[in-house]
Amino acid sequence: MQTENVRTIEVKPEVVKELNEHEQEYLKQLVFAAPCRSWYKGGKSTGKVIAVWSGSAHHYMRALNRVRWEDYVITHTTRNRFAYLGNGYTVEEDKGESNGWFLTNTFEEYQKLKF
């Protein structure tokens, strides 16, 4: 993100609202929502359950496995979000250095390279 001139990343308000609604509906069926005073309800006996993922630890890890970029508002430091692409040449090409070193790699090997 730093190299792509990203200024801010903000979760869309409707995304927060919808995730919370989904989680609260799921949590109704668990013991955390039972009518007793609980840390999970901010020390109250009723109300919204907080500080708990609405699913198992495995479910949580899978949910975090892919970033849902569509759920964010992203702003950039430049007028055009693609300005970071520069002039179409790599630094090495601009310096006149050889860039044929990768030609002996397979497609899979090339995809794994870090530029």
Image (cartoon, rainbow, N blue to C red):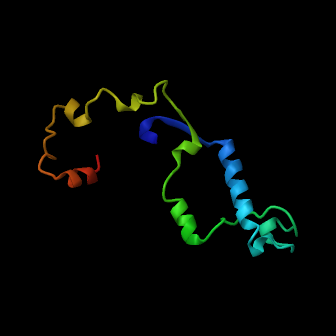
Find residue 112 and report its image quarter: bottom left
Estimate the x, y position of residue 34 in percent, counting from the top left: 82, 73
The tally of labels here is 0
User: Image check: 93 left or right of 21?
Assistant: left
Q: Residue at x 53, y 49 (%)?
A: 68
Find residue 74 and report its image quarter: top right
User: Image check: 48 left or right of 16?
Assistant: right
Estimate the x, y position of residue 99 in percent, counting from the top left: 16, 39
Estimate the x, y position of residue 56 in percent, counting from the top left: 60, 71
Looking at the image, the residue that sits furthest to the top is 79
Estimate the x, y position of residue 26 in percent, counting from the top left: 70, 64
User: Image check: 9 left or right of 97?
Assistant: right
User: Image check: 101 left or right of 32?
Assistant: left
48 lies above or below 13: below
Q: Residue at x 74, y 60 (%)?
A: 24
Q: Residue at x 26, y 35 (%)?
A: 91
Between 26 and 57, the one lying in front of the other is 26
Q: Residue at x 26, y 51 (%)?
A: 111
